[in-house]
């Protein structure tokens, strides 16, 4: 689950960042709902969560430094500047910058682009990707007939979470029980019984 939180000060940002990171395992458990791969149980309640254990560790996982004394804006910016880049987009071409830092790019020390400095055009490619993601999100909200993109008009999607916590059973556990019981190993039932 990805969430964006507003903050009113550096201290507020630090507190919200720490709380949200600490709650990640709980959110993963609440939303555990990917127990099947290619029509069969995969051994996980949240295969989506499992996939992240084999994903680029420079961009994923727990950010332990957020809990260190003195964490704030500057430390987070330092982290972001040192996350290895994937590419730079110049003159209609993707230039492989794998493993190189934006900090080095800002200093003109990027091996893939010796002497080059980032420009607003570099930011533009990031901005364009973000705009495309936003369009996809807005289209999805329209198709679901959700009126408020911030979710303020939607609480129905919380109902399953309430059910799971009261029943002490995740969505994944419920589907696995049905798969091994009533569905007799036929995954096709999931598409009819759990369609939105």
Image (cartoon, rainbow, N blue to C red):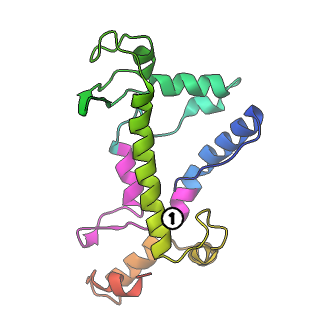
Indicate the quadrant where residue 43 lies. bottom left
Element carrying mark 1 = loop
Which residue is found at the position 55% from the left and 64% from the top? Answer: 30
Does the magenta portion include 15?
Answer: no
Which residue is found at the position 62% from the left and 51% from the top? Answer: 23
Indicate the quadrant where residue 167 lies. bottom right
Which residue is found at the position 51% from the left and 64% from the top? Answer: 31
How many numbered tags mark residues here?
Answer: 1
Q: In this image, 105 relative to 95: left or right?
A: right
The C terminus is located in which quarter? bottom left
Q: Residues within 10 Å of mark 1 (few under 14, many from 20)?
A: some
- In the foreground, 16 or 136: 136
- Residue 63 lies, with reference to residue 101, above or below; the image says below
Does the magenta portion include 43?
Answer: yes
Image coordinates of residue 190 in percent, x first then y, are 35, 81
The answer, for residue 131, to whether it is visible in the render is: yes
Indicate the quadrant where residue 85 lies. top left
Image coordinates of residue 94 in percent, x first then y, are 25, 32
Q: In this image, 92 relative to 5: left or right?
A: left
Instruction: Provide the residue span drawn in magenta.
Output: 27-53
Which residue is found at the position 32% from the left and 31% from the top? Answer: 86
Image coordinates of residue 80 in percent, x first then y, are 50, 28
Image coordinates of residue 38 in percent, x first then y, are 23, 68
- Residue 65 lies, with reference to residue 171, above or below; the image says above
Identify the residue under disc 1: 31
The answer, for residue 164, to whether it is visible in the render is: no
Residue that protrudes farthest toward the bottom in the picture: 182
Q: In this image, 38 relative to 67: left or right?
A: left
């Amino acid at each position: 689950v990805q969430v964006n939180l507003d903050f009113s000060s550096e201290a507020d940002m630090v507190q919200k960042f720490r709380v949200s990171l600490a709650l990640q395992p709980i959110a993963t458990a609440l939303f555990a709902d990917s127990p099947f791969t290619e029509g069969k149980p995969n051994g996980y309640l949240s295969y989506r969560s499992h996939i992240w254990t084999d994903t680029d560790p420079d961009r994923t996982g727990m950010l332990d430094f957020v809990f260190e004394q003195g964490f704030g804006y500057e430390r987070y910016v330092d982290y972001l500047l040192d996350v290895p880049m994937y590419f730079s987009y110049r003159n209609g071409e993707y230039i492989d910058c794998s493993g190189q830092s934006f900090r080095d790019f800002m200093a003109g020390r990027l091996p893939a682009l010796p002497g080059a400095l980032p420009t607003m055009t570099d930011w533009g490619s990031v901005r364009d990707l973000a705009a495309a993601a936003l369009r996809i999100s807005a289209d999805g909200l329209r198709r679901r007939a959700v009126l408020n993109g911030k979710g303020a008009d939607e609480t129905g999607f919380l109902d399953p979470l309430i059910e799971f916590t009261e029943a002490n059973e995740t969505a994944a556990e419920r589907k696995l029980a049905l798969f091994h019981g009533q569905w007799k190993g036929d995954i096709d039932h999931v598409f009819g019984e759990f369609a939105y």
